[in-house]
Image (tube, rainbow, N blue to C red):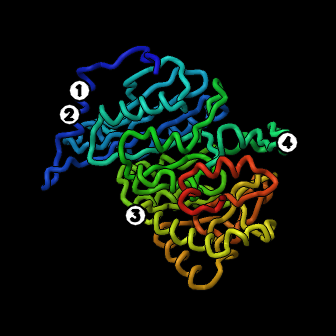
């Protein structure tokens, strides 16, 4: 990675902050505290929403700077179109005044490249070591799809060359988020790459981005965090209601994460929302249950499905996100295998909530009749490009849905 620090890191201040974050211990000698980093990749059309969410964060229950060394630290990395990227600490002083302190200002950079993201995350973890780390990934997001495919899908022609597939223009493109789009490089972050660059184990990873609440994403990150929070459907551009949830985000316990999700649901209950919390400890058991169904006839049953009746989480003709529970209920060979799957889902998906429909422009874009808490791809024999990529994902390697 090129040298990209532009202005300053005041070493004396940084050292004192690191000391504050490490001075309080529990009876077993473990440091108490949570270092939360909100990573905002907003060098795109979400810039104004990023600024709004930063204001919302500052209006929330942010941790105190002088708090007897509890170690609670709230960081925001903001790469917003029109400004240089910056890493900030947000805290309140003993008088309750909230301060936004710029720790590092960077030269313009692609904040969703593996080298840049790895450097920022690693630096934050080194600067503020803590007993727990948490991460919010804020940007556009397209689930498990390969770089660029959501905007410009393609198939292969008879000669083996890529052939563009027509997609409907999205009249609500400015209303939703879709993780990681950098307009300067016109590139996106691959979830396989993301899993490989995370420098520490996180208490939770929360996606404030569209379509990231899928089994493919959760399984890829199963070794990187305890919990994954995300939405199977799209996320409206105004994002999570940070002014109400900062305290729960800093707490980080499961009960607090479910409160975060409740607040998100209530915020968008009249427009549309899906949200879930996945306990990554149980994803291996879920994979075993799904593999059993696929291997006992379920894989072959997919071709005969009525795809129009499956629960969807997409709009227009971007048909790459269906409900995992609905799919498995239709292809399970018997009740026993379906019961094993459902038990595994109940252990893995510890929270789920959805509205009855996803609404934009005053009209339902799709109805939500079934919600298992996770989306999934369903193979399409007419387009082998996605199947080929899907074979490389950890989830498919575990369950062999696509052979």
Q: Residue at x 41, y 49 (%)?
A: 224
Where residue 220 appears, as percent x and y from the top left, is: 51, 51
- The mark that comes first in sequence, 4 or 1, is 1
Give the SS element for disc 4.
Answer: loop
Give the alpha-carbon distance from disc 2 to disc 4, as whole Å.
Answer: 60 Å
Per the rendering, the mark at residue 19 is 2
Which residue corresponds to the image point at 73% horizontal and 68% vertical from the top-left?
Answer: 302
Helix, strand or loop status at disc 2 = helix
Tell me how far mark 2 sits from mark 3, CA to CA. 29 Å
Left or right relative to 66: residue 194? right
Residue lying furthest top: 7
**Mark 2 and mark 1 in contact (Cβ < 8 Å)?**
yes
- Residue 291 point in image, percent of width and height: 57, 68
Residue indicated by mark 3: 255
Q: Residue under circle 1?
A: 15
Q: Marks 4 and 1, Cα distance to the nearest angstrom?
A: 58 Å
Q: Where is residue 60 shown, x and y percent of the image?
A: 43, 45
Q: Which residue is mark 4?
A: 157
């Amino acid at each position: 990675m090129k040298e990209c620090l532009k202005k300053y890191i005041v070493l004396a201040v940084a050292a004192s902050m690191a000391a504050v974050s490490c001075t309080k211990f529990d009876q077993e000698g473990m440091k108490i505290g949570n270092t939360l980093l909100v990573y905002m990749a907003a060098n795109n059309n979400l810039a104004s929403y990023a600024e709004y969410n930063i204001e919302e964060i500052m209006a929330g229950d942010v941790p105190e700077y002088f708090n007897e060394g509890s170690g609670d630290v709230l960081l925001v990395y903001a790469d917003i179109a029109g400004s240089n990227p910056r890493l900030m600490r947000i805290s309140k002083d003993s008088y309750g005044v909230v301060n936004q302190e710029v720790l590092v200002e960077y030269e313009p950079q692609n904040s969703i490249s593996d080298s840049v993201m790895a450097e920022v995350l690693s630096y934050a973890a080194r600067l503020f070591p803590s007993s727990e780390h948490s991460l919010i990934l804020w940007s556009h997001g397209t689930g498990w799809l390969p770089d660029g495919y959501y905007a410009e899908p393609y198939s292969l022609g008879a000669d083996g060359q890529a052939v563009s597939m027509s997609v409907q223009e999205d009249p609500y493109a400015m209303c939703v988020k879709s993780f990681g789009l950098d307009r300067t490089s016109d590139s996106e972050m691959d979830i396989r790459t993301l899993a490989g660059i995370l420098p520490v184990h996180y208490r939770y990873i929360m996606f404030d981005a569209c379509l990231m609440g899928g089994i493919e994403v959760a399984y890829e990150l199963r070794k990187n965090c305890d919990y994954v929070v995300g939405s199977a459907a799209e996320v409206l551009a105004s994002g999570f209601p940070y002014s109400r949830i900062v305290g729960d985000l800093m707490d980080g316990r499961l009960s607090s994460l479910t409160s975060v999700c409740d607040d998100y649901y209530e915020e968008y209950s009249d427009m549309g929302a899906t949200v879930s919390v996945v306990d990554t400890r149980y994803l291996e058991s879920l994979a075993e249950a799904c593999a059993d169904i696929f291997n006992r006839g379920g894989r072959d049953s997919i071709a005969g499905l009525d795809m129009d009746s499956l629960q969807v989480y997409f709009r227009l003709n971007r048909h790459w996100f269906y409900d995992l529970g609905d799919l498995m209920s239709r292809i399970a060979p018997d009740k026993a295998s379906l019961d094993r799957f459902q038990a595994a889902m109940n252990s893995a998906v510890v929270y789920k909530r959805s509205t009855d429909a996803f609404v934009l422009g005053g009209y339902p874009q799709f109805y939500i009749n079934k919600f298992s808490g996770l989306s999934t791809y369903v193979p399409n024999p007419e387009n082998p490009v996605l199947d080929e990529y899907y074979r490389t994902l950890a989830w498919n390697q575990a369950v062999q849905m696509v052979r």
